[in-house]
Amino acid sequence: MKSFYRLLKYLVLFLFGTSIIGAGGLYGLYLYLEPKLPSIETLKDVQLQVPLRIYSSDHLLIAEFGEKRREPLRYDEIPQQMILAFLAAEDDRFFEHPGVDYQGLVRAAIQLLLTGERRQGGSTITMQVARNFFLSSKKTYTRKLNEILLALKIERMLTKQEILELYLNKIYLGHRAYGVGAAALVYYGRPVDKLELSEIAMIAGLPKAPSSHNPVTNPAKALVRRNYVLGRMIDLEQISQAEYESAKSTGISAKLHRAPSEIEAPYVAEMARTEAVNRFGLDAYTKGYTITTTIESHLQTAANQALRSAMQAYDKRHGYKGATAHMRITKDTSEETLIEFLSQQPDGADLLKAVVTTVDAQSIQVTTDQGEPLTLAWNALEWASNFVNHEVKEAPPKLAEEVVSPGDMIYLFKEIPSEGDPYWRLAQIPEVAGALVAIAPDNGAIKSLVGGYDFYQSKFNRVIQAKRQPGSGFKPFVYSAALESGFTPASIFNDAPVVFQDDTMEAVWRPENYSGKFFGPTRLRYALTHSRNLVSIRLLRKIGIGFTIQYASRFGFDTRELPRDLSLALGSGAVSPLQMGTGFTVLANGGYYVPPYIIDSIRDNKGEALYQANPVQVCDDDMLEAASLDQKQTSDTKSAGKTESTNTPEPSEATEAPPPQCAKRAISEQNHYLMHSMLRDVIQHGTARKARALERKDIAGKTGTTNDQRDAWFNGFNHHMVAIAWLGFDNVEPLGRGEVGGRAALPAWIDFMQFALNGIEEKVPELPPGMVTMRIDVDSGEPVGTGSSNAIFEVFEAKNAPTPHDARTSSQGGSVASGNTVAPAEDPF
């Protein structure tokens, strides 16, 4: 018996000694490891990697850029059922243990003793937070000890709710989704608070193997894991039996969802992304910056539709180029096979992909990439003459088999006729390029921008990157320069043949009007209305090339990009659609230069403003007074000198909006009035008469067409909006006979402005001071009495108003009015 007690005594002493040694060893290990542990202070203000997001002015998402998709959520924004599901799957004793689950560690130790293998086990959610934020995922004893020590420190510094919030926002859940908010959008296309129990359990099961066992990559294994989570939830009495059975019987609905773009403006997104990278470098993709643009979503949608419709109309006029792909179809070909074939073909923006399954006499049956069967009647096919080149197409088809065959992959376009119902018709991805940009003339805000038919086929942004000849669209700036030089809308220039031997042009130049005809002495108003080239050339020669180029800089044009020869009169320079839009804003807003801008604000991930636009704008009297007062205060502060107090402004004062930047006048209000009225005539009586379909008297603009119809433009505006439409080929080949600005580009402008001006009150400029109205002879431009039968009213600056003997044609082909004045009259326009 004594031997037993002696043995027991030695055993107790051994165990006690071993415990002391073990405790001492652990404490020594702690003293060794603790100084090497990272500081966890950063967890109190952790910066998660959040992608760059671009929004429209009405806060619709345009695009998201970043390697990681993340939707950070506060703890109170995470559904309770999502929290319970993760606790059931990962750490059901989370709210009970101090950061380390000793029961779990014992289980892991027993597993090690029995199998000799280190396996995942005993890791609490807090330990996973420690690993995810500070440690590698490599399985070593040292990492595990560091994990335990860090978890204990984290639990002392953060609440359980703060730890869960970090965990559920940081954890990787497959397919670039980090955090439960992103996973909900990636797999189900819905925010986390809109998920069903079966979907919540699916996401909660992902941390174990997010890349290989997610519901998109491996649905079978994901289903097993989901059901395991549901089983754990019912074992822990987190859900009812009915909820368990219902969720378990639900199939897998997960599929990959892109970042939910709410408005199609990829060219705008790329402009904003470039600006962000220029400002912030690669941090732009991870710091959660938010860029709000000036784009208005409804106008952007209208611009997309208007430009694409015009490009499709051009493409339709020139014939069908044939199917882009073909597959063999038999009676056994399944719908799944058709859809799979179509999925391999390139998308076409707003076009629908389809396969021809049956060809009848004058109709066809197709199956779309959504598996929808459609019948195309003859009106959807009859346009499809075979394309030869941009000048020639074959005779119209008489039967459907002349156009397509069974197995052809085709595109469908939703045709919206002026009368009747919309219908799908045969179409193709246009080879022609195009651009449309719309600008608010009062402050330069870009309201819509479309740089091409499909960004994903061509990222070349033609609004800002294409430098094309503006053709006759440049004439308004030459005519405005002429008015500045003393000419009037009634000045006469001879529309007659002319030959120039110009050394700067290195050739003999014989310019012509588009019609090839000559019309003799012509008033400037009439010449601009009907875009007479020879008058414009003589006018430029009269006022001087150097003066005109410098004058054009008032409209924002780079003088280095303008030719220093007479071809300038016909728009031979190289400009972008945005530059044209900037120039026409001066003609729309009363004569002020306002540079365009597209980024309204940039904010960090906390919503703090890093940049807020303060655009140059046309100021009313109140704004002018505010700007003047600010300038005076600034001047007074500077003059006070350094001896004066420089107190920091109160917070309310420091955060006040800056005073407006008032635009400077580029042209006189009299010049603006005359140009506005002359350009309204272009629509009412000239080359843009199609725009009368808008039934407005306040719209104005100018068509533009270059040699061989290589560029087609329409530049138009009213007081509310400037819009520029351009069509042409990127390789500058001709568009084809008859494809002038009024035919190719004007329809896009009309369709857009029909929408943009809906509900906008008509408003034409008021007659400014210093103007007179006179009755003049239509042919000579000279003032006439009331008895003349060949007379019209014309408006003049009083200082340039003609007398009967002063409106005579000069030897150079132009007339200059005298300084005689006439009593002001009412505006005839």
Image: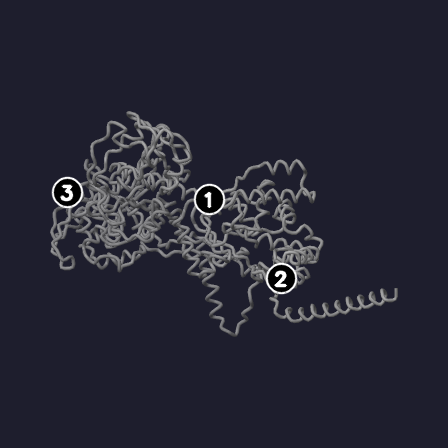
Badges 1 and 2: C-beta atoms under 8 Å apart?
no
Residue wearing tag 3: 516
Residue in view at x 42 percent, y 44 percent: 264
When the figure is inspected, residue 286 is found, relative to residue 229, above or below; the finding is below
> CA–CA distance between discs 1 and 3?
49 Å
Callout 3 secondary element: loop
Q: Is residue 468 left or right of residue 39?
A: left
Q: Residues within 10 Å of mark 2 (few under 14, many from 20)?
A: some
Counting residues from the start of the chain, the first of labels 1 and 3 encountered is 1
Counting residues from the start of the chain, the first of labels 2 and 3 encountered is 2
Residue wearing tag 2: 144
Task: Name the residue at the top extreme.
Answer: 361
Give, as a three-letter code, the residue at label 3: Gly
When the figure is inspected, residue 20 is found, relative to residue 540, above or below; the finding is below
Residue 207, image x, y percentages: 57, 51
Callout 2 secondary element: helix
Q: Quadrant of the N terminus?
A: bottom right
Q: Is residue 467 left or right of residue 30?
A: left
Residue wearing tag 1: 262
When the figure is inspected, residue 635 is found, relative to residue 565, above or below; the finding is below
Q: Residues within 10 Å of mark 3 (few under 14, many from 20)?
A: few
Give, as a three-letter code, the residue at label 2: Lys
Mark whose residue sits in front, 1 or 2: 2
Q: Residues within 10 Å of mark 1 (few under 14, many from 20)?
A: some
